[in-house]
Image (tube, grey):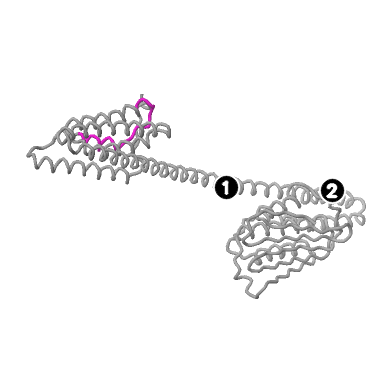
Amino acid sequence: MQSFLKFQPNPFRFLVYTEWVMLTSCGSLAGLEAIAGRRLPLEHISVLLLLCMMGWVLPTGNLPVKILYTLAEIGLIFYGTTLGYLHILPTLYLIVFIRSCFIFSTIGRWAICGMLLVLFLDNQIIYVQNMTKLMPRLEEQFWMHLVAETLMFGLGLFLVLMLVNTLLSERQSQGDLAIAHQQLQQYALQSEELGAAQERNRIARDIHDSLGYVLTALNVQLQTAVILQQQEPDRAQPFLQQARRLGMTAMQEVRKSVQALRQENRAEQSLTETIAAVVDDFRQASGIQTQMQITGETGGIGNIAVSSAIINALYRIVQEALTNIYKYAQATTVTVEIEITSEIVRLSVVDNGCGFDRGSSIRTGFGLQGMQERIAVLGGTFILETEPGRGCRIGVEVRLTNTLPEVSSS
């Protein structure tokens, strides 16, 4: 029963106020006639007040409630016609039609429009017939007046229909836009959480593959040294030295993992500062000779605005590239180059390592494919140049205003 008799406020308050102005004008006309006739039209004022109150809320329940609501409004207007105020019918019918546009669907709106036009014609014909009985010589002029009034009323109905359809379409578009915006925020949050989870998985895998192996080997060396220390102390020394080297390697791996897990505030750092920090950490942790070169159109590279999305993507790409170099490349030198202009950012990571065959060594997951995916989101270009025994070069190019995805590998 509650859903059957469901009502809601009028969605557009300015239309409610417009209706009140129209009803007030009708009441003013009745007041002027009341002054002339020295009689207060209480019934007429009551009809207008009821119509005014009915417009404050609109039914949103089942179709029978909406039909009864509209018929009640028309019934009030018909009762008003018995009081002799036929000249205000167009205004009252327009008010009913405005409300019906918010109640019914498109088919219902056209049905109400046609019904009101028929009722208006019927009332106008009665009005003209009554007037021609009083002034038979002006019959032709009254019929011309009927045609003109009908055309104006029909035009008013059409304009009201178009106006309300536009308002409802705009309201629907705003609602869809708000929903889409909310979904986009949710997708962005999910993407960020997924990226964080993937990054944690990558670090966990690196710890298992590198640190786990080093600690296992260290344990074996120490166990062997303990056994030999009791029987043949001289033979235990090489095992202890190897254990010492493995311990230093384990410390480097721990430092790398801690740096990767640490939540650094890169939002306030520029692109060059962020990449420089990664390169410096890599140099200290790996011992590989690493250089960083920065170029641009002008000396004021730091003044060129680079979005946080680009900074984060390039940071992750450099981090991944240096990690792969440390683990697989067997390189002795690494060069990281950054070129920033007002339109484009270029990044390259070059090593003199062993290289690899691209046709058989590219892995899925967080390796080279992950780099390509990051650049594809930014609409940039990814370039891979490598051959066995000739090192590797990873190149990235991102336009600062680009929105079209383009990924290539050469």
Above or below, 102 against 264 in this view is: above
Above or below, 76 against 347 in this view is: above
In primary-sequence order, the first of circles 1 and 2 is 1
The residue carrying pointer 1 sits among few (fewer than 14), some (14 to 19) or many (20 or more) residues within 10 Å by Cα, namely few
Q: What element carries label 1?
A: helix
**Pointer 2 residue:** 220
Residue 51 point in image, percent of width and height: 25, 35
Residue 304 point in image, percent of width and height: 61, 68
Residue depicted at x 18% and y 41%: 27
Q: Could you say which quadrant of the image residue 254 lies in?
A: bottom right
Q: Could you say which quadrant of the image residue 387 lies in?
A: bottom right
Q: Relative to the observer, which residue lies in front, 105 or 250?
A: 105
Q: Relative to the observer, which residue lies in front, 272 or 326?
A: 272
- Is 54 magenta? The answer is yes
Residue 48 seen in the current view: no
Q: Relative to the observer, which residue lies in front, 131 or 360?
A: 131
Question: The magenta stretch spans which residues?
Answer: 47-65
- Are dots 1 and 2 in contact, CB under 8 Å? no
Residue closest to the far bottom: 299
Kind of residue at badge 2: Val
Above or below, 272 against 191 in this view is: below
Question: What is the CA distance from the residue labelled 1 to the residue labelled 2?
Answer: 45 Å
- Is 134 magenta? The answer is no
